[in-house]
Image: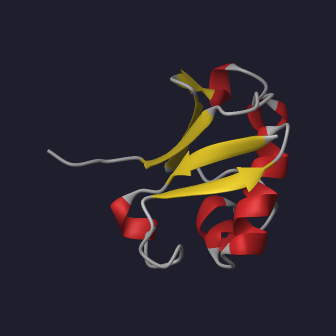
Amino acid sequence: MAATIRIPTTMRPISGGASTVKVEGSTLAEVLAGLDAAHPGFNERLFDEDGNLRKFVNLFVADDDVRYLDGLNTPVPDGETVSIMPAVAGG
């Protein structure tokens, strides 16, 4: 099963400048593992030293925030879009 991952501008240097990347996987964890295998460096940006998703990174499967679904175990149907969105703060 292939998913399309939308890469935010700040992380595009890791993906060679690509705004989207297609990877295989049936869960979010598998999709992210495939992303890091294809473009090493994403794991350091997405996960903390304990392997947890960093608090300032939001992930969406379709338009649903995975924090309110099954987290990294969220199913990713074939052809679905996963979006990486760094949190923005400021005033």
Relative to 3, is 24 above or below? below
Residue 25, image quadrant: top right
State the quadrant of the C terminus.
top left
Q: Position of residue 33 (x, y in %)?
A: 80, 60
Relative to 44, is 51 above or below? above
Tell me what residue is drawn at x 63 percent, y 69 percent: 42
Q: Position of residue 17 (x, y in %)?
A: 41, 74
Relative to 89, is 81 above or below? above
Q: Is residue 71 left or right of residue 79?
A: right
Q: Position of residue 79 (x, y in %)?
A: 67, 33
Q: Position of residue 24 (x, y in %)?
A: 80, 50
Tell me what residue is drawn at x 51 percent, y 23 percent: 63
Residue 23, image quadrant: bottom right
Tell me what residue is drawn at x 72 percent, y 69 percent: 36
Tell me what residue is drawn at x 58 percent, y 36 percent: 81
Q: Is residue 43 left or right of residue 8?
A: right
Q: Is residue 9 left or right of residue 77?
A: left
